[in-house]
């Protein structure tokens, strides 16, 4: 691994530090940090968190720190992935985040840059990058998740508009979104991947009904979205009619690289402090589990350093497959939260354990979100089998069958 900055990156790092020192506070690593409030149960705290995310993104944009790797033609800085890594490394020390806006920038930005019309790029990219407009991803449906191309939401052309009917589900942050990226079926009589068309939908259009889904831990991260005779102008179509899968693949690729980069979040110190509070650090079985949590954390750190080295030095052969990073991260998370709740014993079943506000209880219930979102653990194992180990692809029985005649969930 090579952790030395080139002279250019060292100068850039100094510039980033100056900016962050002037505009953000250092992170405390506890409840004093507003950037931890993304999962807040209290609606006022959650609203304040969103406001601060928008303000922070606005500041990044107006000071030239947003869209570091976006081309300058689209309002970015045209810098390299290595610059973005340096920026993220420095930002990690500060109590600042763009929070819920980050995913939209990572998914919608590259998709519109690659497939959007000039008018769409002109209209949507700047407000996306400045955080003035929030977006959601209207892809999954009750019968189409891992097998996304099986989706059934229908769009039928009517002059210069399309009329959309169907249901989406698990749509993160749809209740706060101004626009959504939407995949629909425009031709049911061709094989499933060929009959899809991709649109931008205004979430305030008549017929869009967003219903938050309240999760076990009491928050509504995602929603059901019903689309009932929603009229979408043809000008909002992204790519060709029937070419939606190609456009969606750009979004999905961006999603995978965003999620595989999430493996750096670690929490050994928090588990250790719970074990100390309960005087369990002398128990050999607890010590063994703590050692595993610590080991996971070290491995994740090295995997992330290796990936960063690959980017910084251009040595692509060092890069780890994103599916490996994602599955390792979610398994480590499970081990960590299970240990904390186990050690708490009966207290672990209470929402307000001695650490208050259900810190571990929240994380215990939330562990399933990263395991499923952005592709399930099993689907990522399939990716590894096919793409990293070179195993044969899964058999597909409906590849050449018209969608209308295929068997569906
Ligand atoms: C926190 C979170 C946020 C999300 N946000 C969004 C969002 O903003 N927008 C959006 O559109 N969607 C979103 N999703 C939905 C997400 O993309 C889907 O949940 C995911 O793709 C899985 O689809 P599914 O839930 O329909 O499960 P299914 O695909 O029905 O899977 C059910 C089970 O079958 C297994 N399985 C399925 N296919 C295979 C296979 N080929 N091989 C082996 N096993 C298989 C799965 O691993 C799983 O265990 C979100 C999900 C979560 C958890």
Image (spheres, rainbow, N blue to C red):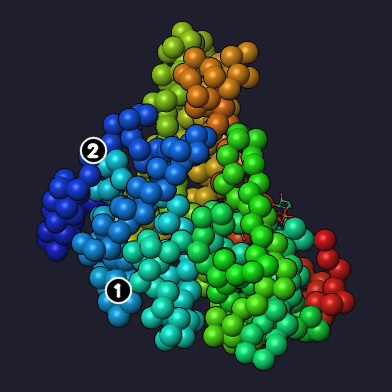
Q: Determine the residue positioned at 16% across, 59% down.
A: 12
Helix, strand or loop at mark 2: loop
**Cβ atoms at labels 1 and 2 below 8 Å apart:** no
> Farthest residue toward the bottom?
159
Helix, strand or loop at mark 1: loop
Per the rendering, the mark at residue 75 is 1
> Farthest residue toward the front?
206
Instruction: Judge by depth and name the residue closer to the eye, 259 or 128.
Output: 128
| Ligand 1: quadrant of the figure | bottom right
Percent coordinates x, y for residue 168 in the rendering: 68, 61
Per the rendering, the mark at residue 26 is 2
Instruction: Judge by depth and name the residue closer to the eye, 34 or 208.
Output: 208
From this view, report whether residue 49 is shown above or below residue 14: above
Q: Determine the residue positioned at 73% across, 82% down.
A: 156
Among the 4 quarters of the image, the one containing residue 397: bottom right
Percent coordinates x, y for residue 254 in the rendering: 48, 65
């Amino acid at each position: 691994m090579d952790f030395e900055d080139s002279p250019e990156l060292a100068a850039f790092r100094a510039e980033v530090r100056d900016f962050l020192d002037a505009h953000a506070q250092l992170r405390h690593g506890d409840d004093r940090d507003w950037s931890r409030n993304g999962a807040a149960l209290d609606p006022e705290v959650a609203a304040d968190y969103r406001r601060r995310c928008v303000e922070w993104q606005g500041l990044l944009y107006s000071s030239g720190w947003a869209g570091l790797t976006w081309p300058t033609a689209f309002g970015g800085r045209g810098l390299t992935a290595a610059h973005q890594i340096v920026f993220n490394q420095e930002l990690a020390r500060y109590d600042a985040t763009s929070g819920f806006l980050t995913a939209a920038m990572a998914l919608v930005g590259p998709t519109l840059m690659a497939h959007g019309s000039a008018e769409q790029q002109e209209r949507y990219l700047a407000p996306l990058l400045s955080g003035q407009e929030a977006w959601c991803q209207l892809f999954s449906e009750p019968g189409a998740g891992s097998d996304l191309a099986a989706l059934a939401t229908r769009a039928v052309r009517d002059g210069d508009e399309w009329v959309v009917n169907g249901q989406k589900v698990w749509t993160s942050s749809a209740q706060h979104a101004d626009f959504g990226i939407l995949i629909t079926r425009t031709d049911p009589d061709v094989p499933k991947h060929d009959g899809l068309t991709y649109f931008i939908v205004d979430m305030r259009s008549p017929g869009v009904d967003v219903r938050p889904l309240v999760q076990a831990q009491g928050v509504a991260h995602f929603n059901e979205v019903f689309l009932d005779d929603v009229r979408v102008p043809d000008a909002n179509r992204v790519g060709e009619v029937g070419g939606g899968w190609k456009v969606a693949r750009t979004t999905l690729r961006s999603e995978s690289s965003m999620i595989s980069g999430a493996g750096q979040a670690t929490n050994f110190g928090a588990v250790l402090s719970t074990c100390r509070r309960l005087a369990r650090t002398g128990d050999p079985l607890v010590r063994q589990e703590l050692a595993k949590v610590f080991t996971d954390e070290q491995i994740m750190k090295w995997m992330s350093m290796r990936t960063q080295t690959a980017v910084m030095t251009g040595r692509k052969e060092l890069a780890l497959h994103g599916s490996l990073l994602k599955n390792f991260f979610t398994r480590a998370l499970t081990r960590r939260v299970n240990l904390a709740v186990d050690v708490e014993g009966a207290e672990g079943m209470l929402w307000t354990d001695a650490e208050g506000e259900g810190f571990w209880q929240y994380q215990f219930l939330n562990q399933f979100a990263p395991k499923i979102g952005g592709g399930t653990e099993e689907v990522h194992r399939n990716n590894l089998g096919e793409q990293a180990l070179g195993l044969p692809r899964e058999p597909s029985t409906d590849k050449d069958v018209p969608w209308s005649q295929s068997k569906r969930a």
